[in-house]
Structure formats: structure tokens, C-alpha cells
Amino acid sequence: MATVEERVKAVTAQVLKLNVDEIKNEDNFTSDLGAESVQSIELVAMFEEEFGIEMDEDAALSVETVGAAVEFIANVCKEQGVKVEE
Amino acid sequence: MSKAKKKHRLVDTKEPNLVEDIFVHSLPPLIRFEGAAIENIDGEAVEFDFAGIKDRPIVITDTTFRDGQQARPPYTIEQMVHIYDLLSKLSGPNGVIRQTEFFLYTKNDRETLDRCRALGHKYPECTGWIRAVKGDFRLVKEAGLTESGMLTSCSDYHIFQKLKFRTRKECMESYCEVVDAAFEAGVRPRCHLEDITRADIEGFVLPFVERLMEMSEKVPEEQRAKIRLCDTMGFGISYPGAELPRSIPKLIYKLNREVGVPSDRLEWHGHNDFHKVHTNAGTAWLYGCDAVNTTLFGFGERTGNPPLEGAVMEYIALKGDTCGIDTMVITELANYMRSIGLPIPDNYPFAGRAFNTTRAGIHAGGLRQDERIYNIFDTEKLLGKPARVAITDKSGADGVAHWLNEFFGLKGEDRINKIRVHKLARWVIDQYEVEGRLTAISDQELEAKAKEFFPDHWAKYAEAK
């Protein structure tokens, strides 16, 4: 099973139409990866679908980097009892 | 202007000050005053107590069927009776919309008047409008009216250039003869001082009105002449310090305090040629006219008159209370007027289809967090029209979410958050970025997409509908 980090990067690559190998943990979704307003919403929606979780809208949208998203999603998975590879 | 600069320190707080004593949201923002207003008149500083307006018996009068009808093809009798009925409902039990005036010259004019009165409404009271011709008071009397407006044009443009009087004296005598005829007929004359804002105030207007007041002393109170200040060309100025004849404060002061026309017999009638019509009417109220004359949606000769619905909102803002006015009828009247072919621009205040519709996504975001940020007051409560967003490429997911929630009528916890609208938001963006669209997306298109992307919500909506 892929790790949270791998899955986050795969979803990010798919939504933002990027090569997954180009995405680094320190990348900012907006300034480095070019996510526009609606793409940020799509990212959150696709993360929810990928992991089978529900995230608080404002908290999820305030996450700025890929690495922070990995950490945030891992915590939500733990809170909601969803098993993932760390 | 002599005060020195003053330091202003930041008052830091974690609690917002939303100034809710003024912006109550359940009413239009209140208009409050501090201290007296000062106007320099003939070298003296004269005080006006604006705050006292809360206790003054100010009213709105209507001329939709007279001046309003001069700007459009005639209404049918049925249309006028229906509009009158709605005006009465809007006015409420206290008669805030106190009077409306009718032509009396044709069979249709008289039938309209009869049918409106047959409805049995106390307000608005029906009054007439005639030329300054003695014989015309017979029409007023026959119609059973107790008050009628009559033209008493007062600028030299009218006296000499239009009416061809040889002297002002001849003009004044002619007007006074007609006023006498009104008194003899037992009718209260409402003298329409046409073109007052470019008249010779000291040389004609004040002597003429003084004469009218003297004549009025000989008749019962209910018959005494009323004075309508007609800003025929929209030249009136509300600014303190403006000169006569354009100064509204000075005009009203001269008539009210120097000549002694009581406030309840003074009325302001404006035109919008310089975009000043609503503020000028409000100014007239503040400086001492108890009545402002208006038309529905401002329709009137050329650029129109003070909009009645604007005066209604001003009235509530000044009084701090609806005083029995049923503001929801404004929307009913707007829908009816549109249905009979009167165009109301979409962005027209209070009545346009999109007067409280925002197109910017960032504004929609504000609306989503707290409606008060971008809605002027509770437009759903007062006008039956919740704040809306129009969807374009600038609307963002916030705008789409707001549209959907308003469309489905979802409140509180039931509202769909913007994460859930991502598919519809993507469809909107693609309309512009992929399809090259240049127009706003219509409600009909969005409804079709709402049905496609939100079948569960749609089913509930369709069932409730």
C-alpha cells in the first residue's frame, strides 16, 4: 500500500496536471505548484475521496504546503479511524 | 477649521464593533444626527433641528398617476386601480403614503378615480390636478374631491416666456383669482410653484405666497392653501451655503419661517435632471417640508421624480421604525410594473432583479461568512429578496456555493460547503477557460447543473416546490 505522502503527491499531480516526481514536500500549493482558487477546492475534495475522510473546510484550505497536507491528512485519518501507511 | 491636528490612538480589541445601533440589519441603516445643522441666511446663522424629524408628522405623497404618467403611455383603468390598491397596502394603517393625485379631464380619468375610491381605502387620499383655470374647479367639486393641485408657475421663464403675462402683478392677480375660485368651491388649493429653483424668490415667490397665506386666513383650516415647491428642472441644491434660488434649505426657511407657511402645508416635488432627486427630497424633509412628492420607481417627466420606494426607505431610516409600512409590497409593485411593460433596470435600488446580486467571488465569500458584510440590510425580510450572486468566471467556489444554497433554500448546518461544489465550480471555470464564454451563466443553466450534480438536494427541492 502506498504511503500518505505518495498518495497526496499522486492526487496533487492529477489535479494540477503535473509530473509526480516534480512535487516536493516543501512546495507551496499556490506559489510553487500554481494551484488556482478552484483547484484548491478540487484538491481538498479529491483528498477526501482518496482517503475516505471528511475535512474541516476552513482548516483544510489553510494548509499551504504538500508536507503540511501529508501531516494534516494523516491526523484526520487517525481521528476518523481510517488506516493508512505512514 | 481652526482646530489643531489631533492624535488618534488605535483602540485594539478582539471583539468587532459592528456599529449595530445604526446598522440594525432588520431595517435600513438608521440616519442619526448630532447637534443642530447651521445655515447662513441673510447674514445670520440659523439652526435646524434635524434630530426632531423623528417626532415630526412627515409623509410621502405620490404622483405616479400624474407626473409618472406623463413619462409613459397611459395606464389602463384596471392597471391604475391595481397600483392604487398596492400603494394603499404599502402605505399601511398610518398612511405614510398620504395622498396621490389624479387627472380629472377625461371620462377615463374620472372612472379611475371613482373605482379607486370605491376600494374604500383611507390612504392614500385621492386629490386632483388641474390647470390654473377657474372653471376647472367645477371638475374637482363634481368629483367630490376636497383638494386639488393647480399650476402657479413662478419663475420669469414661465411667467413671461411661457405664459406671456405682461407683468408679475398681472400674473399674481390671475393666480389669486383661481385660488379664490377654489375657496368658493370649497376646495383646498395646492399651489404648485413651478420652476421655483430659478425664480425670483424675494421679488415674486415670497410676496405671492404671503398673499396666499393672507387669503387662507379667511377660510377654514382644512381649506387653507398648501404650497408645493416644484423643482421642475432639477436645479435644487441641498448643500449648506448654496445661494437662492437653488438652495433648498433657504427656500424652505423663507417660506416656512419668514412667510409662515406651516410645515404640514409645504411639499417638495423634485426632478432628477442632475441625479440629485432623492437627496433633495430628503433635504426638504429635514429643513421643514412635511411632505415629499414621489412616483413609483422614479418614473416621471424626463429624468423622473423622487422614487417612492427610496422615500419609503429614507422614512424608515429617519424614524427608526417601519411605522406600519409593508415594505414587501415594493417587490410586488416592481413585479407588477414589469408585467405591464415598465422597464426597471436590473441594478435599480430595492426593486431591480439584481440590486443585491454580487458578481465578485471575494464578495460571495463574504456573503457566505456573514450576509451583513455585502447586503445592505435584511433584504429577504423587508423585500422578500435574499442576497444573491451572479455566476461568472470571477465568482469562485464561494459564489457557486452561495448560489446553490440560496437556490435550494438551505440554512445553517444544512448549507452545502464549497468543497462539495467543486464539480459545479469546475464546470463554471471551464465555460470560460475552455469554451471561451463571455457572458454570465443564467439561472436556468445553473439549475440544470444543480439537478445533475446534486440529485438528492434537487429531489427535496422539487418535492417542496
Image (cartoon, coloured by chain):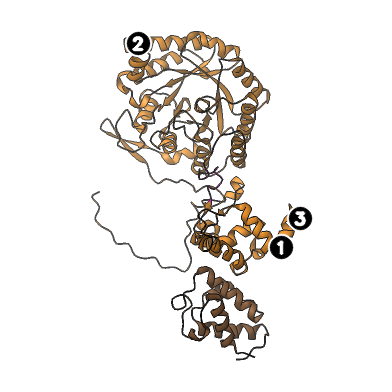
Picture colour for chain A: brown
Disc assigned to residue B65: none
* In this view, the mark in front (1 or 2): 1
Q: Secondary structure of the magenta portion, mostly? A: loop
B415 over B41 or under it: above or below: below
* In this view, the mark in front (3 or 1): 1
Is B128 in front, or is A16? A16
Task: Using the rendered view, name the quadrant where residue B460 is placed.
Answer: bottom right
Name the residue tied to disc 3. B463
Which comes before the other along the chain, label 1 or label 2?
A: 2
Pointer 2 with pointer 3, Cβ within 8 A: no
Who's orange, chain-wise? B
Which comes before the other along the chain, label 2 or label 3?
A: 2
* In this view, the mark in front (2 or 3): 3
Q: Residue at x 60, y 48 (%)?
A: B385
B270 over B194 or under it: above or below: below
Label 3 amino acid?
A: Glu
Q: Are marks 1 and 2 on the same chain?
A: yes
Asked whether B346 falls inside the magenta stretch, the response is yes
User: Dot 1, how many residues are within 10 Å of its Cα: few (below 14), some (14-19), or many (20+)?
Assistant: few
Label 1 amino acid?
A: Pro
Name the residue tied to disc 2. B165
Q: Secondary structure at mark 1?
A: helix
B282 over A59 or under it: above or below: above
Name the residue tied to disc 1. B455
User: Dot 2, how many residues are within 10 Å of its Cα: few (below 14), some (14-19), or many (20+)?
Assistant: some
Q: Which residues are magenta?
A: B345-356
Q: Percent position (x, y) of residue B456?
A: 72, 63
Pointer 3 with pointer 1, Cβ within 8 A: no
Q: Percent position (x, y) of residue B463?
A: 76, 55
